[in-house]
Amino acid sequence: MTDGRLLLLDTASLYFRAYFGVPESVGRAPDGTPVNAVRGLLDMIARLVVDRRPTRLVACWDDDWRPAFRVAAIPSYKAHRVAAEVPAGDGATTSVEEVPDTLAPQVPVIVDVLAALGIARLGAPGYEADDVIGTLVARERAKPADRRDPVDVVTGDRDLFQLVDDEARVRVLYTVKGIKDLEVVDLARLQERYDVPSGAAYADMAALRGDPSDGLPGVPGIGEKTAAALVRRYGSLDAVLAARDAGDKGLTATQHRRLTEAADYLRVAPGVVRVAPDAPVADVDDRLPVTPADPDALVALSERWGIASSVTRVVTALAG
């Protein structure tokens, strides 16, 4: 058993939360440019490092926030969040996410500051941060037990509850109450809150239930409680669908009809809801840095953007 801990950040989830949680009036660069998301994210990282004491840390990134393979399966996937479609070569287009005007320019600053600090930042072409997280979790699970670090996933996205695995020591630190009061989601919490027996069962329940915030319709008429009850009764979504096809008497006539009418959706939904365990994520040194990778660049960024206090908090936390 190792003494380490791997902390995986759903970075966009955190910097969106920072943007809306830190007023622009108190988060501005010397020239007046808003940097509230930058400051807020850095303060979150400092707090997480102090409170959770990870030995490894990865800021997971959305290289593609609306992957083509998910859109091909369910065209409504995140469609309500598309600001524009822009040419991507060879007649293809790529979706531009609707992001607040004063947040978008802060994202490159976050990239630069993480690089100067030496904090690993990982994305994968054609995949979301969720898939990066899922892949890194899968890689950790694949290690021999005596070389495997426990994993904490920090996110405001319930989709990642599917990764919870007590045996592999994977849990989610859910930001619904804020970074100072994280909700620890483990198997007991999944069972208590959602009445599902595992992270995999949560994903199956989520596919049945759907998620309007992601443009996933779900099965009309089957809400969260019914979806959880079906998965619990039959063991998995595949088993629910097998019961449907067999005319199992455990399904009411209404449930059978609804599951049948949603057959096209249910055929593709699992591939959209489940995070990829095998995205092309690079192998990098994810050890928590003790000192900044590029101190001069970090000083310049601190002065340019007026974020010295937040940078100092992170540097102090890393050295601690």
Image (spheres, helix red, strand yellow):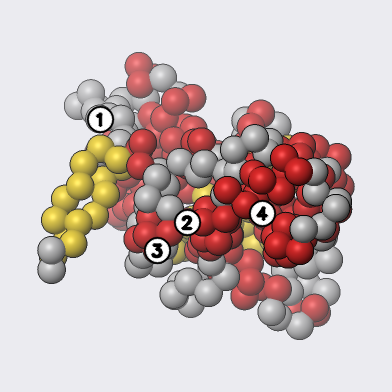
Q: Quadrant of the N terminus?
A: bottom right
Q: CA distance from mark 3 to mark 1?
A: 28 Å
Identify the residue at image location x=85%, y=53%.
249
Q: CA distance from mark 1 to mark 2?
A: 22 Å
The residue identified by callout 3 is 69
Q: CA distance from mark 4 to mark 3?
A: 18 Å
Q: Earlier in the sequence, mark 1 or mark 2?
A: 1
Callout 1: SS: loop
x and y percentages locating residue 223 in the rendered image:
68, 36
Identify the residue at image location x=70%, y=32%.
181
Q: Residues within 10 Å of mark 2 (few under 14, many from 20)?
A: many
The residue identified by callout 2 is 129
Q: Earlier in the sequence, mark 4 or mark 2?
A: 2
Position of 24 relative to 287 (above/below): above
- Name the amino acid, label 1: Asp
The residue identified by callout 4 is 203
53 sits left or right of 81 in the view: right
Identify the residue at image location x=43%, y=53%.
74
Q: Residues within 10 Å of mark 4 (few under 14, many from 20)?
A: many
- Name the amino acid, label 3: Phe
x and y percentages locating residue 197 in the rendered image:
84, 54
Q: Are marks 3 and 2 in contact (CB under 8 Å)?
A: no
Quarter residue 118 falls in? bottom left
